[in-house]
């Protein structure tokens, strides 16, 4: 009796990998992804794995759905689940146990269910890039962070209604190896998104003192907040402020102290600590000078100050820029 020939599903992974690499990304998605779990696992190695430990979830992932009737959010949820299911954490020999870096696309709007699914499947994660986070709630984000004890680098986009002190406490308690942190926000007078004010900077310096590199992107920053970061974060080697809006405190009203107002143009500055010296190197546009933290912050807030206050309406109350 002649044994039946092996089917396509029985091909070895290395052979399938060589065949699939001859296909375009579009053909790979349409022709192999929905055949079976084994083919989907091999396809994901080409579609989403940059190397053995780096998973890059591009916008293509939202098209990995059989149904065309689902809205983009539902397709994303279904497709992301397919990708995450390719590496169960119960198998130490599988990719999921080795993933160290996950890079999300700017076009991906994740919900709590997505970020927690990722956290469940990647407990050994060391680097996370999440450009869009305002559809994730703070409790959902904190639940995910608690699963990443080995996290060393975190880059996170704007988070709506972020309770920064609470978030920093979870980050500091869980991620003891975190040395690189990038936070993004919106340059707005609204307090709905993260701002580098005195309270938030004190919380960050106390909860995550091991930081070596801190970056702020499109962040409303207060003079006192920047001073605290530079003075209290003793291990900080570099502070990047990219397109940040400088804030001043507006006059207190009967309802309480002012929330602050933006003034001047957005500014970018790179600050590096001079080892063995109290001063720091400040790189502002073409300017390269050494200042103490207080002196540097004073100079930073003086740029464009005259032009702004020249337009202050007559009889306006005094403004505290400290």
Image: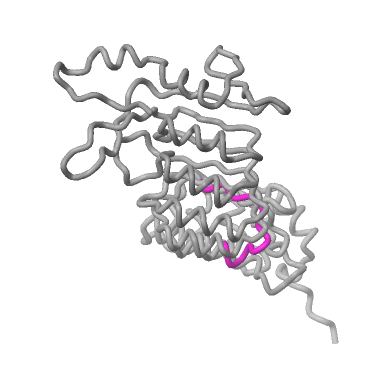
* The C terminus lies in quadrant: top left
Q: Is residue 236 left or right of residue 92?
A: left
Residue 47 seen anywhere in this rendered image of the structure: no
Q: Is residue 143 above or below residue 163?
A: below
Stretch of the chain drawn in magenta: 119-130
Where residue 152 appears, as percent x and y from the top left, is 66, 50
Where residue 65 appears, as percent x and y from the top left, is 48, 61
Question: How many dots with numbers?
Answer: 0
Towards the viewer: 80 or 4 = 80
Q: Is residue 261 above or below residue 256?
A: above
For the point 69% across and 60% down, the residue is 42
For the point 37% across and 33% down, the residue is 187
Residue that extends furthest to the bottom in the rendered view of this protein: 1
Q: Is residue 117 magenta?
A: no
Colour style of the rendered protein structure: one colour
Q: Is residue 193 left or right of residue 33?
A: left
Q: Is residue 121 magenta?
A: yes
Q: Is residue 103 left or right of residue 159?
A: right
Towards the viewer: 66 or 106 = 106
Where residue 180 appears, as percent x and y from the top left, is 62, 43
Where residue 292 appears, as percent x and y from the top left, is 57, 23
Towards the viewer: 14 or 307 = 307
* The N terminus lies in quadrant: bottom right
For the point 38% across and 61% down, the residue is 70
For the point 77% across and 66% down, the residue is 11
Q: Is residue 300 above or below residue 6?
A: above
């Amino acid at each position: 009796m002649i044994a039946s020939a092996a089917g396509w599903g029985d091909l070895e992974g290395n052979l399938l990998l060589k065949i699939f690499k001859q296909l375009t990304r579009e053909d790979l998605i349409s022709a192999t992804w929905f055949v079976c779990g084994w083919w989907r696992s091999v396809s994901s190695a080409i579609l989403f794995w940059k190397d053995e430990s780096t998973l890059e979830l591009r916008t293509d992932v939202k098209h990995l759905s059989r149904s065309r009737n689902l809205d983009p959010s539902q397709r994303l949820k279904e497709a992301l689940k397919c990708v995450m299911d390719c590496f169960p954490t119960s198998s130490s020999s599988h990719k999921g146990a080795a993933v160290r870096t996950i890079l999300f696309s700017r076009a991906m709007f994740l919900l709590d269910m997505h970020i927690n699914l990722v956290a469940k499947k990647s407990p050994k994660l060391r680097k996370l890039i999440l450009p869009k986070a305002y559809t994730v709630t703070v409790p959902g984000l904190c639940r995910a962070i608690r699963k990443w004890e080995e996290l060393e680098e975190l880059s996170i986009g704007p988070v709506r209604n972020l309770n920064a002190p609470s978030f920093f406490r979870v980050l500091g308690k869980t991620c003891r190896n975190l040395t690189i942190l990038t936070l993004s926000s919106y340059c707005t007078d609204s307090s709905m998104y993260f701002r580098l004010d005195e309270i938030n900077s004190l919380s960050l310096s106390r909860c995550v003192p091991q930081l070596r590199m801190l970056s702020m992107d499109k962040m409303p920053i207060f003079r006192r907040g920047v001073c605290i970061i530079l003075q209290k974060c003793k291990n900080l080697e570099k502070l990047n402020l990219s397109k940040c809006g400088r804030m001043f405190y507006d006059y207190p009203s009967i309802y309480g102290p002012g929330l602050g107002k933006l003034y001047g143009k957005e500014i970018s500055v790179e600050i590096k600590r001079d080892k063995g010296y109290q001063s720091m190197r400040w790189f502002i546009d073409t300017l390269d000078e050494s200042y103490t933290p207080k002196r540097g912050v004073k100079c930073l807030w003086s740029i464009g100050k005259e032009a702004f206050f020249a337009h202050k309406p007559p009889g306006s109350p005094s403004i505290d820029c400290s």
